[in-house]
Amino acid sequence: MARAILIVLDSVGCGGAEDAHLYGDAGADTLGHIALACAEGRGDRAGLRSGALALPNLVRLGLAHACEASTGSPLAGIVKPASPQGRYGYGVERSQGKDTPSGHWEIAGCPVPFAWGYFTDLENSFPADLVAAIIHAGALPGILGNRHASGTAIIDELAEEHIATGKPICYTSVDSVLQIAAHEEHFGLERLYALCRQVRALVDPLRIGRVIARPFVGGRETGFNRTGNRKDFAIPPPGETILDRLAAQGRPVVTVGKIGDIFAHRATGAEIKPFGNAAMFEAALTAWSDLPDGGFCFVNLVDFDTEFGHRRDVPGYAAALEAFDAMVPRLEAALCPGDLAILTADHGNDPTWPGTDHTREHVPILAFGPGIAPEPLGRRESFTDIAATVGHWLGLGQVGPGRGW
Ligand SMILES: O=P(O)(O)O[C@H]1O[C@H](CO)[C@@H](O)[C@H]1O
Ligand SMILES: [Mn+2]
Ligand SMILES: [Mn+2]
């Protein structure tokens, strides 16, 4: 029997998407622009990191080769090995959109066959009847925000008014999301979750991908900070995913981080949700060491996206990549004969790009494990090739419409 671990480095795109112009993202390249910024001294931060981007383990497995195949340009400041030790290539997203559910569902074998609903108006983003329904459902005195915003910026701006009035802060982005920020103590965490569940039902007819609870703590003196109690209320995937196939066959499954939320907790096995990339990686390794034959471990590492991509923080993003790179040898050491590891991403979030939103990009794909011969995977015409590969590896038959390698 075999096992597989699939780690999604949230937002670690590798540029090159031919349809990026449809999203206002022509030329966006998360990894490429971080590497370039670092090579030019724009990735330095005292006490954090400095110099060229250093990803020796990922580059050894083929990351620089994958990036160059995607964009046609080398990663600045990085010397490629003559022969990578892993299988490397890049994936093209077929689903419309550039958000987390689209990317993950396609990776899992279920591309999105419909167009998401969006709140496109930058101000007064939510229709008046929806605002009225939210206020009625939550017995609220009103809502604040009601526009496109960066989550940290809008909390800084409106948290005190939120505490004074009891009105939750509702905002959106270019993604198919309705986000609700509220203070954990003044508004109440469970009350926020309950409100999000009610709003989830209200926006189902609008095909909104996610309602996201964004709890925060703090006060005027200390400043306000979001907590690890974020919760995403997603619509379920519109077809079978590899998780469904595994569940149908009674296979052991562990999901780490946001995976449970992203798949609306359908067939998501044992869910583990620690806070932060390092804690999630540790939890994944622990779960992996106990995972029986035939099992699957599906991990999302969200900090790249939430903490650094949306915050347009190049040094922070570079440091997070370097920290992950340093973890890779422990993952390799944890692989036994018959095990397959895949690293990929769900979309881009170029921290050098205007705005604070995701960017439409290709994603790198690295696959490795004991006895897995290195070879180029080339251009994969859909992220679904990943589910197809894992499905065959685990003896599940053909999963999704993809082409396994
Ligand atoms: O600015 P914050 O609140 O992190 O919001 C971001 O998080 C959402 C979900 O990933 C994205 O749609 C983007 O708006
Ligand atoms: Mn994502
Ligand atoms: Mn995001």
Image (tube, rainbow, N blue to C red):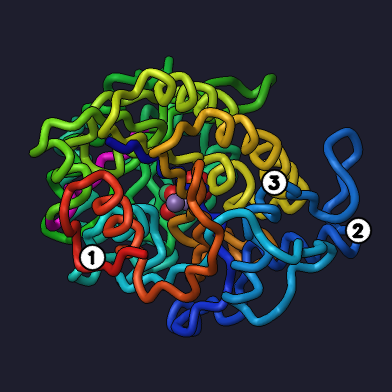
Q: Separation of disc 1 and disc 2 at Cα?
A: 40 Å
The question of residue 234 being in magenta is answered with yes
Horizontal and vertical percent for residue 70?
A: 57, 75
Foreground disc of the pair 3, 2? 3
Q: Are marks 1 and 2 in contact (CB under 8 Å)?
A: no
Mark 2 crowdedness (10 Å alpha carbons): few <14, some 14-19, many ≥20 = some
Identify the residue at image location x=58%, y=20%.
218
Please give the count of numbered marks on the rendered protein: 3
Residues drawn in magenta? 231-239
Horizontal and vertical percent for residue 282?
A: 53, 23
The question of residue 217 being in magenta is answered with no
User: Which mark is drawn over residue 112?
Assistant: 1
Left/right placement of residue 303 relative to residue 97 reads right
- Quarter of the view holding residue 238: bottom left
SS for dot 2: loop
Q: Name the residue under label 3.
A: 57
Horizontal and vertical percent for residue 32?
A: 69, 67
Q: Which of 360 and 286 is in front in this view?
A: 286
Q: What residue type is labelled 3?
A: Asn
Nearer-N-terminus badge (3/1): 3
Q: Which amino acid does label 2 sit on?
A: Gly
- Quarter of the view holding residue 92: bottom left
Nearer-N-terminus badge (3/2): 2
The answer to whether one can see residue 234 in this image is yes
The answer to whether one can see residue 168 in this image is no
Q: Separation of disc 3 and disc 2 at Cα?
A: 22 Å
Q: Name the residue under label 2.
A: 41
Identify the residue at image location x=39%, y=39%.
338
Q: What residue type is labelled 1?
A: Val
Whether the residue under disc 1 has CB within 8 Å of ligand 2: no
Q: Nearer the viewer, residue 156 or 140?
A: 156
Left/right placement of residue 57 relative to residue 380 reads right
